[in-house]
Image (spheres, rainbow, N blue to C red):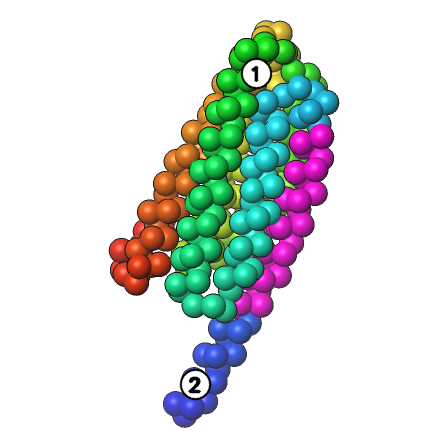
Amino acid sequence: MDDCCAKKSETLNLLAQGDQRRVLVIVMVINIAMFVAEFTAGVIGQSSALMADSVDMLGDAFVYALSLYALSRGPRWEAGAALTKGAIILAFGLGIIVEIAFKIGNGITPSSQIMMTFSAIALLANGACLALLWRFRKLNVNMSSTFECSRNDVASNIGVLVAGAVVAWSGSFWPDIAIAAIIAAIFLRSALSVLASAWPVFRGHPGAVKLD
């Protein structure tokens, strides 16, 4: 009986990992496609917020690739992947700050129509990713940090959409800059959260991990 239960448990674990892998592949492909579309639109529309949002999606594609690599490799590998994800998020946050400074110096007003159109498309895409990741959000530190990335994306998409509407109403470039700055702040907060959660596991103290 014990042997049978052990085999069932092993089978269920393998099935769960298979489900995680399929979901991660799907959301990775979505994020890569949306990065290309949104970044191109950001360059054409001269929107810092849209480009920041697209780079976030590229970062998430790397995140999902790291998550796939960490599957079946144990808690320490998962924590190591989460630490890498935290570092990526931190780097993008700092990169956005540099972009913001550049745009303030030039003062170019972005295309509000392009901002609203592509941020709405990105919102739909990230909403789908979030729905796919929902049931895995507290499974382990790796999937928790992955869910954190997608949740940030949804907030960023909404922010860019609102910024586009305000740019259309005011004719000012400041809403675009403001949302880009908020996205940077979200990146930095998320990076600290992911790093703080993953480090105790990586050091061998899983009880100290905060997954919420």
Pick the front one: 115 or 127: 115
- In percent of width and height, residue 131 lies at 56, 49
Q: Amino acid at mark 2?
A: Cys
Q: Residue at x 42, y 57 (%)?
A: 80
According to the image, label 1 marks what residue? 103
Question: What residue range appears in magenta?
Answer: 16-40
Q: Residue placed at 64% from the left, 41% from the top?
A: 125
The mark that comes first in sequence, 1 or 2, is 2
Amino acid carrying label 1: it is Lys
Which marked residue is nearer to the observer: mark 1 or mark 2?
A: 1
> Which SS type dominates the magenta stretch?
helix
Q: Residue at x 41, y 34 (%)?
A: 188
Q: Do callouts 1 and 2 mark residues in contact (Cβ within 8 Å)? A: no
Q: Could you tell me how far apart the alpha carbons at marks 1 and 2 are, in whole angstroms? A: 61 Å
Q: In the structure shown, which secondary structural element does the residue marked by tag 1 occupy?
A: helix
Determine whether 87 is above or below 103 in the image.
below
* Mark 2, residue position: 5
